[in-house]
Image (spheres, rainbow, N blue to C red):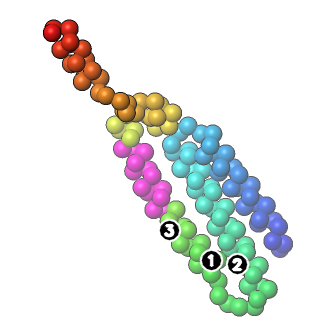
Amino acid sequence: MHLAYPAVLSALLFCTGLYGVLARRNAILVLMSVELMLNAVNLNLVAFDVWLSRAARDTLHSGQALTLFTIAIAAAEIGIGLAIVLAVYRGRGTSDIDKLRDSAEPHGPDEATVMADEKAEATA
């Protein structure tokens, strides 16, 4: 098999995942898109490992070893990411990224402090 086939498939998977990260609003779908991107990297690592091992005639499969590390990192990322998404969903009632950004706390003075200052000025 030529190296171009898995490389093109990997590029298509990565571009699909990148589009999902940039265009989706649901946090779960964004996490799934990140997983697609990591799987594209894994496919590239294994394909180039096989291609380089045929050329060099060595038995060191470093691409496949790196793929196992990437799978472990992806599993940890999806576990922590889902835990964060579930905690945010329980607290705010939505997993829509835009709504979470809009409902963030303001960086300026607190509304209660501003209202208390206005009351103090009105009574004085």
Contact check, label 1 and label 2, Cβ < 8 Å: yes
Determine the secondary structure under disc 1.
Answer: helix
Residue that mark 3 sits on: 72
Of the residues shown, which amino acid type is indicated by label 1? Gln
Residue 109 in the image: state x and y as whole percent.
31, 28
Residue behind mark 1: 64
**Quick check: 66 left or right of 112?**
right
Amino acid at pointer 3: Ala
User: Magenta segment: does it hold 78?
Assistant: yes
- Please, what is the dominant secondary structure of the magenta stretch? helix
Quarter of the picture containing the C terminus is top left
* Distance (Cα) linking label 3 and label 1: 13 Å
Residue at 65% in and 49% down: 18
Part of the protein shown in magenta: 75-87
Q: Quadrant of residue 92?
A: top left
Circle 2: residue type:
Asp
Q: Residue at x 71, y 52 (%)?
A: 15
- Crowd rating for badge 1 (residues with CA inside 10 Å; few <14, some 14–19, many 20+): some
Q: Residue beneath label 2, please?
A: 49
Residue 60 inside the magenta-drawn segment: no
Q: Quadrant of the N terminus?
A: bottom right
How many labels sit on residues? 3
Q: Earlier in the sequence, mark 1 or mark 2?
A: 2
Residue at left 45%, top 52%?
A: 81
Above or below, 118 against 63 in this view is: above
